[in-house]
Image (cartoon, rainbow, N blue to C red):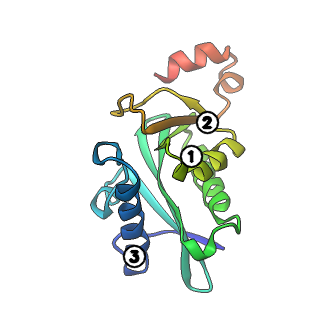
């Protein structure tokens, strides 16, 4: 799979993003849908990637900068015919590598609490994400699960305790 940075308005990804938004609205109450539309994905703080195989876009994902040391995963999506092939893991690993290269200490995400989102929660947990509190502009919501992963060993780099590192990151 070839992963590349693209403009979310690229015609090759329009249908995957439209389907993603449609399913989010069909699955969750409107106030609990936090998926970004194309305009939101074009924000300067968002980097949008696609994974292609044989010239077909099969997976997408974005990394949004929340601050100097943290990012948020957005718009992770695999087309239905390509599910179960490990493409989401490949995209997630790519996004985490980008986060590390930017010096992020933590990557966060919001996903749904409904059964529909169980495969996504399992994917994130397999990669070390743990459930946490709302972050950024999110509020406590029974339809949301907030997860995070520490991707950069601040304590080892600075020679301090992990607690000191968390204080410095805020």
Name the secondary structure under disc 1: helix
Label 2's element?
A: strand
Residue visible at 34% across and 56% down in the picture: 25
Q: Which residue is mark 1?
A: 99
Mark 1 touches mark 2? (CB < 8 Å): no
Residue placed under numbered mark 2 in the picture? 149
Spatial CA distance of label 3 from label 2 is: 30 Å
* Residue drawn at (67%, 58%) of the image: 89
Q: Residue at x 62, y 52 (%)?
A: 119
- Disc number lying in front (1 or 2): 2
Q: Secondary structure at mark 3?
A: helix
Alpha carbon of mark 1 to alpha carbon of mark 2: how far? 11 Å
Position of residue 64 measured from the top left corner of the image (x, y, whole percent): 43, 48
N-term-proximal mark, 3 vs 1: 3
Residue found at the far bottom of this picture: 54
**Closer mark to the observer between disc 3 and disc 2:** 3
Between residue 44 and residue 111, name the one nearer to us: 111
The local crowd at label 3, few if under 14, some if 14 to 19, many if 20 or more residues have their Cα within 10 Å, is few
Compared to residue 33, the image places residue 169 above or below, namely above
- In this picture, residue 44 sits left or right of residue 93: left
For label 3, the residue is 15
Q: Is residue 7 visible?
A: no
Q: Quadrant where the N terminus lies?
A: bottom right
Label 2 crowd (10 A; few <14 / some 14-19 / many >=20): many
Callout 3–callout 2 Cβ contact below 8 Å: no
Q: Nearer the viewer, residue 78 or 155?
A: 78
Please state the horizontal and vertical placement of residue 117, each as a whole percent of the image. 53, 50
């Amino acid at each position: 799979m070839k992963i590349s940075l693209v403009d979310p308005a690229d015609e090759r990804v329009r249908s995957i993003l439209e389907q993603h938004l449609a399913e989010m609205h069909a699955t969750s109450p409107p106030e609990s849908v936090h998926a970004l539309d194309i305009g939101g994905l074009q924000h300067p703080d968002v980097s949008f990637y696609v994974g292609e195989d044989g010239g077909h876009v099969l997976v997408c994902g974005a990394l949004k900068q929340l601050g100097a040391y943290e990012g948020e995963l957005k718009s992770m999506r695999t087309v239905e015919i390509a599910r179960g092939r490990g493409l989401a893991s490949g995209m997630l690993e790519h996004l985490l590598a980008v986060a590390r290269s930017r010096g992020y200490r933590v990557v966060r995400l919001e996903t749904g609490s409904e059964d529909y989102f169980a495969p996504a929660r399992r994917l994130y947990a397999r990669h070390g994400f743990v459930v946490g509190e709302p972050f950024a502009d999110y509020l406590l919501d029974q339809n949301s699960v907030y997860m995070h992963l520490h991707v950069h060993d601040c304590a080892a780099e600075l020679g301090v305790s992990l607690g000191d590192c968390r204080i410095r990151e805020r």
